[in-house]
Amino acid sequence: MDPRRNPLMKTALIRISRYGLKLFLAALAITALLYIMVFTPLGNRLVKPLFQTVLSAYVNAPLEVQTFSLNPNSLHLNIRDEHNNLLHLQGKFSLITQNVHAMYNADFSHNGGLNTLNLPFKTSGVINGNSDIMNLQGVSEIWEGRISYRMRMYDFKPSDVQISLIDIHYQNLMQWLELPHESTTLLTGEINLKGLAHRDVSGVVALQTQTRHFSPSPIIDDNTSFDFLSLFTDDKGKIQPFRLNLTLKASANELGIFEQFAMLPLRGNADLRAILQGDHHRLVLEAKSNIARSASHARIHWKRLRPSYIYLDMKHADAATLFYLFSRSAPIEGKLSVNAESNMTHTAGKISLLNGLTHPDILKRDYRITQPKSHFTTSILLNATPKTIHYNGTFSSDLGRTTIDDTTTHKGMLRDLLKALP
């Protein structure tokens, strides 16, 4: 039926057209109003106080938005807090694609406010992308050194990270951690990680320290301990699924700088090469080191992030250097080898020392043992459970020889050894 010959249908079509036109005009008016409120100088002045309030609530500190300029093609922000920390952002913004390309710089020289880390630093760089994929690149001045970084984020979550550490002053780092320390040490290194957002992490961490001066500091015991589980669990202690494939490289010419972390008065130098692979079900660490001038190899297994197996093979370590490692005077010299493995319920091992030589003055001063200088060799086997420990072995010197036979206590083993001494 032709609507032109039907008055009722014609009237309905006119009403629908008028209603549609009203909806269109209303939508156009709302769009224009939003445009005026957001993307014009008048709108920016209206939105600025609201933006300042929301941002202050987000950082839980009073902020002053000194500049707020937003239009469909660009943005410009200047923000200052009550501590005189400054943040500047300026660049291009696309309303249609929601992409941003902007330069930023921040001067967070004072603690508090915008500086939620309470760590004085300056940083500048470029931010590029949208809410789905964002790339961040820049340089920070921190701890009297520099950190250059590249970061890719998905849904504002870091995924791929490249970080270069350049001449970081280790003393400043320790002061920030509120740990006693006295050294002239520079920290350099590279950290390249991928897959953080999906918890499928691969990459390389390489760190090096160069120390020119070191003085031991009192070791602080704050009654806290590092929990390996906390790295991979949520707030409720539940293990979150993950996968790791990391290569670790480290070199230090003065191990003493780690005394506060090891809770031991360390000295000496060492290189470390390690691979950490696995997932939340099973994790394996393979490590090699030249510590105490040795050729050392260690392997650690974790099941559900609990240690399940440990293996150690240290070949031809310098005994005097090993004592020096723990800041102790060496009562003996020689080449020390250790081989041991444990499944956490049973431990078996062998300790041997070749070309041994005693130092009577240190034995007397530190261990109250009086004997002349002597050359010796020893080989000791041990088997241990949580309740018992058994030793077997021999000790030979130019002063005597003894056999250690199924000794069940440390004191008994030492007593058997001392039989060889006059």
Image: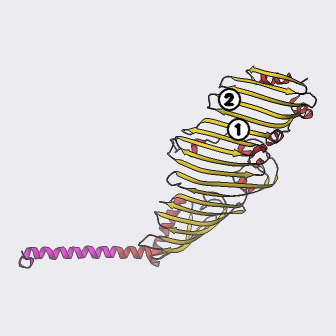
Magenta span has 158? no
Res. 278 visible in picture: yes
- Camera sees residue 108: no
Among the two numbered marks 2 and 1 on one chain, the one whose residue lies closer to the N terminus: 1
Query: Which segment is the magenta one?
Result: 1-30
Q: Which sits in the foreground, 269 or 232?
A: 269
User: What is the crowding at mark 2: few (fewer than 14 residues within 10 Å), some, or many (at least 20)?
Assistant: some
Q: Which residue is located at x 73 percent, y 45 percent?
A: 260
Seen in the picture, residue 282 relative to 134 is either above or below; the reply is above
Q: Residue at x 53, y 58 (%)?
A: 158
- Badge 2 element: strand
Residue 145 is situated, as x and y percent measured from the top left of the image, at: 71, 62
Q: Nearer the viewer, residue 381 or 112?
A: 381
Say which quadrant the C terminus sits in. Answer: top right
Seen at 55% across and 48% down, the residue is 244
Q: Which residue is mark 2?
A: 348
**Side of 407 relative to 107 (left or right):** right
- Residue 135 screen position, x and y as percent: 53, 65
Residue 352 point in image, percent of width and height? 78, 32
In this figure, which residue is indicated by the disc labeled 1?
A: 313
